[in-house]
Image (spheres, rainbow, N blue to C red):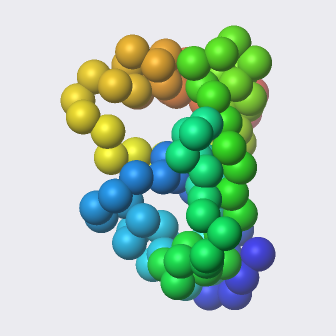
Amino acid sequence: MGQGPLNGLRIIEFVGIGPGPYASMLLTDMGAEVLSIHRKGAEKSAIPDIASRGRKSITLDVKTSEGHAVMMRLVAEADGLIEGFRPGVMERLGLGPDDCKAVIKNSFTDV
């Protein structure tokens, strides 16, 4: 984990194109821990991308029950999620806002 004003912040990024990777790069540069999720079949190339610096990454098939369960455990421990899919894709994967909120609520205890 890096140093900076966002040290201790945990972010999950579904790897894509556009502003998501750039936002993840900036968050990492400011100290956040970013975990990049690559789709099965679209794994990270052997050539490192400068924008991916400082990030951990895994390949996960969230369409399988095992992959979905892993993703939901990661969501429960994360502070934020970045995705750049078309509208409705995350909901169809069972990872929409309502699904994520349910997991987050269940991970907290009443204070």
State whether residue 68 appears in this view.
yes
State whether residue 9 appears in this view.
no
Residue 6 position (above or below residue 15): below
Q: Where residue 16 sits: x, y (%)? A: 40, 52
Quadrant of residue 64 in the image? top right
Quadrant of residue 3 in the image? bottom right
Quadrant of residue 63 in the image? top right
Residue 67 vs residue 96: left or right?
right
| Nearer to me, 27 or 22 | 22
Q: Residue furthest left?
A: 87
Residue 18 vs residue 48: left or right?
left
Q: Where residue 99 sits: x, y (%)? A: 50, 19
| Nearer to me, 83 or 48 | 48
Residue 76 position (above or below residue 84): above
Residue 52 vs residue 83: left or right?
right
What is the count of numbered marks? 0
Point 48% across, 52% down: residue: 15
Quarter that holds the N terminus: bottom right
Point 47% across, 19% down: residue: 93
Residue 5 vs residue 66: left or right?
left
Residue 73 position (above or below residue 92): below
Point 71% across, 82% down: residue: 2
Q: Where residue 29 sits: x, y (%)? A: 55, 84
Point 68% across, 44% down: residue: 59
Q: Where residue 53 sits: x, y (%)? A: 61, 80
| Nearer to me, 91 or 43 | 43
Quarter that holds the C terminus: top right
